[in-house]
Amino acid sequence: NTNFLYFNEAYSKILGYEKEELFNMPCLKLTAPEDVKRVKDTITLTKEKGFVENFETTYLVKANRRVSVNMALALMPDKQGLLISIKDITESKRKEKQIHNYVSMIDKNIITSSTNAQGKIIHVSEAFAKISGFTKEEMLGRDHSMIRHPDMPKKIFKELWQTISASRTWQGEVKNRKKDGSFYWVDMTISPNFDEYGYKIGYTAIRKDITDQKLVEELSITDSLTQVYNRRHFDDLIPKIINSAKR
């Protein structure tokens, strides 16, 4: 009936109750309402199998605190009682939730992807799927050429692969093609990934959307009437061409 027959000081310390208080309440009463059915089912399973371990549940303890516990239950030899051991995992569950929230925030807001060593996509963020117009499922297993814009020179990607193949980080601005044929610009950083033995197992790319910035740059060097480059762009470009010719 889950009435207490014995408990040690460590158990009562986790719950915050005095011994006298615990003897006057069943163990099941400590269970959070949403977990009561699961606990009852687990008790039934323990009676049938004799042992259940790594069962996680939530206790409602003194002062309305919620404590997460990992529990192991064993049927006593006389089959008239249960031996229960618990471990307080409240802090680890809190950190787990914190990490989950952090990862979720990154997934929704950071344009990122990972590939295996052959360049096949094994992970894309929600933000990447959103800006590209492709679903995650459409991108997994393929390579990034699916979003390559024809305006981008092939030598850029040749340089990119030479850099990351040499286990170095590559950074640069890339124009990508969306699923609907339109484009977007990103400032991209790609770094190799290594396993615990130092072997390269793939690559991770992080991108920043700079489409608006590139459009502003384009407007600043283009004549609004003729749509050709203006004097400002000429003044900026001609010294570079002259220096190149001299070399």
Image (spheres, rainbow, N blue to C red):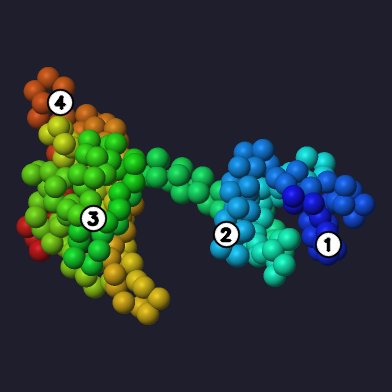
Inspect the image, locate mark 3, and give the three-letter code of the amino acid beneath it: Ile
Disc 4 and disc 2 in contact, CB within 8 angstroms: no
The mark found on residue 48 in the picture is: 2
Horizontal placement of 74 versus 204: left or right?
Answer: right
Please tell me in which quadrant of the rendered image residue 143 appears.
Answer: bottom left
Closer to the chain start, of discs 1 and 2, is: 1
Secondary structure, mark 2, is helix
Secondary structure, mark 1, is loop
The mark found on residue 206 in the picture is: none
Inspect the image, locate mark 2, and give the three-letter code of the amino acid beneath it: Glu
- Separation of disc 1 and disc 3 at Cα? 55 Å
Outermost residue to the bottom: 197
Q: Quadrant of the C terminus?
A: bottom left
Image position, residue 47 (x, y; %):
62, 59
The mark found on residue 121 in the picture is: 3
Tally of marks = 4
The mark found on residue 6 in the picture is: 1
Q: Residue at x 34, y 40 (%)?
A: 127
Disc 3 and disc 4 in contact, CB within 8 angstroms: no
Q: Toward the viewer: 231 or 6?
A: 6
Image position, residue 86 (x, y; %):
70, 61
- Separation of disc 4 and disc 1 at Cα? 86 Å
Q: On the image, numbered disc 4 is attached to which residue? A: 223
Inspect the image, locate mark 1, and give the three-letter code of the amino acid beneath it: Tyr
Q: Nearer the viewer, mark 4 or mark 2?
A: 2
- Separation of disc 1 and disc 2 at Cα? 23 Å
Inspect the image, locate mark 4, and give the three-letter code of the amino acid beneath it: Asp
Horizontal placement of 34 versus 175: left or right?
Answer: right
Compared with 125, 189 (above or below) is below
Closer to the chain start, of discs 4 and 1, is: 1
Closer to the chain start, of discs 3 and 2, is: 2
